[in-house]
């Protein structure tokens, strides 16, 4: 059993943390924050509940969170259950007409509504939509090129109904945020031809953050952030520094498209972007409301 003095110390520590957080709460009050939720955290109920409570807390202190979620593993599991083969080219899922129907069912149905339910259970008011709703994301077909082995020649590859944002209309998000609701967005888009397109969640989140002029774009991943040659977290980078690290090979592999998305968002109007480990409990709150943060912040060159 704890003594009264030790209990008092615990409460004093909590008060000190709260006092430290107050300036940061004021900083984000009234501002939009776009959070991309994905990775292994989406497959763990405890992580989902922690994330949901973070979103409710953000809303309660005056920030305006917008959630954009992924769902690649869940889509793969559903296709396996339906005995439908998944084909990938350079890590991108080839999406035919039958597959896009399953993708939409999983993203805009099961995953989206599950996240909405979790936020509601945490005391918030969330509304699940996809990029197709309210003309949020107008998409165009992704033109993907792949290099021929031992050659400089590139071939244009047809990935089917895989798209990229062509235009983003934030009116539906503004309406929901204005009504104190938390938008939860499935990364789908609608082409001018009426066709549904599957969009990479990182890309969708970056485009939404740019269009909103969000104060922060938070990219929740399965790694701590951008690491240096020794594997140590780099807490802060300018756009120029990030580009140099990509050119030198320090930033490589799957981290490259994430950093590129952050750079594009910052250059298009987002205040800053952060790559952080979504598996950490209350990672969003630690990043936004503490002096040290938890991930790698990427900001414009000064």
Image (cartoon, rainbow, N blue to C red):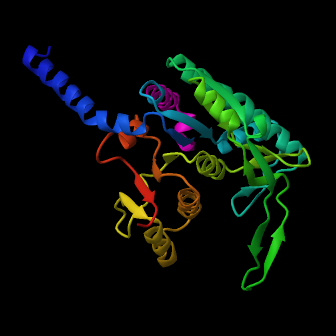
- Residue 49 sits inside the magenta stretch: yes
Picture layout, residue 157 above or below residue 196: below
Give the side of residue 275 with respect to residue 230, left or right. right
Give the side of residue 64 with respect to residue 106, left or right. left
Picture layout, residue 10 above or below residue 186: above
Q: Residue at x 79, y 64 (%)?
A: 143
Q: Residue furthest right?
A: 193
Picture layout, residue 102 above or below residue 252: above
User: Residue 198, position in %: x, y?
Assistant: 77, 47
**Residue 182 in view here:** no
User: Residue 188, position in %: x, y?
Assistant: 75, 43
Give the side of residue 229 with respect to residue 291, left or right. right
Quarter of the figure that contains the C terminus: bottom left
**Residue 213 in view here:** yes
- Residue 169 sits inside the magenta stretch: no
User: Residue 42, position in %: x, y?
Assistant: 56, 36
Quarter of the figure that contains the N terminus: top left
User: Residue 100, position in %: x, y?
Assistant: 83, 43
Between 186 and 252, the one nearer to me in the picture? 186
Q: Residue at x 40, y 63 (%)?
A: 237
The magenta span reads 37-57
Q: Residue at x 40, y 51 (%)?
A: 295
Q: Residue at x 75, y 37 (%)?
A: 78
């Amino acid at each position: 059993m704890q003594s009264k003095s030790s209990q008092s110390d615990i409460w004093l520590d909590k008060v000190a943390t709260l006092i430290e957080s107050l300036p940061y709460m004021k900083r984000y009050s009234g501002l939009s924050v776009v959070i991309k939720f994905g990775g292994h955290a989406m497959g763990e109920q405890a992580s989902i509940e922690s994330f949901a409570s973070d979103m409710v807390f953000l809303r309660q202190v005056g920030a305006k969170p917008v959630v954009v979620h992924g769902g690649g593993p869940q889509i793969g599991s559903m296709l396996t259950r339906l005995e439908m083969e998944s084909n990938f080219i350079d890590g991108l899922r080839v999406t035919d007409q039958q597959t896009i129907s399953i993708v939409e069912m999983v993203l805009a149905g099961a995953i989206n509504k599950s996240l909405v339910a979790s936020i509601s259970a945490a005391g918030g008011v969330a509304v699940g939509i996809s990029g197709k709703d309210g003309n949020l994301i107008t998409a165009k077909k992704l033109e993907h090129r792949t290099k021929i082995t031992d050659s400089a020649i590139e071939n244009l590859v047809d990935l089917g109904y895989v798209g990229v944002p062509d235009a983003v209309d934030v009116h539906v998000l503004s309406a929901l945020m204005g009504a104190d609701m938390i938008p939860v967005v499935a990364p789908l888009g609608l082409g001018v031809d009426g066709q549904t397109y599957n969009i990479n969640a990182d890309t969708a989140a970056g485009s939404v953050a740019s269009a909103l002029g969000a104060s922060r774009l938070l990219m929740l991943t399965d790694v701590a952030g951008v690491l240096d040659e020794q594997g140590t977290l780099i807490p802060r980078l300018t756009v120029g520094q990030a580009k140099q690290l990509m050119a030198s090979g320090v930033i490589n592999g799957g981290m490259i498209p994430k950093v590129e998305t952050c750079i594009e968002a910052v250059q298009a109007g987002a205040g800053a972007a952060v790559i952080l480990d979504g598996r950490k409990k209350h990672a969003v709150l630690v990043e936004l409301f503490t002096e040290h943060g938890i991930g790698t912040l990427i900001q414009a060159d000064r």
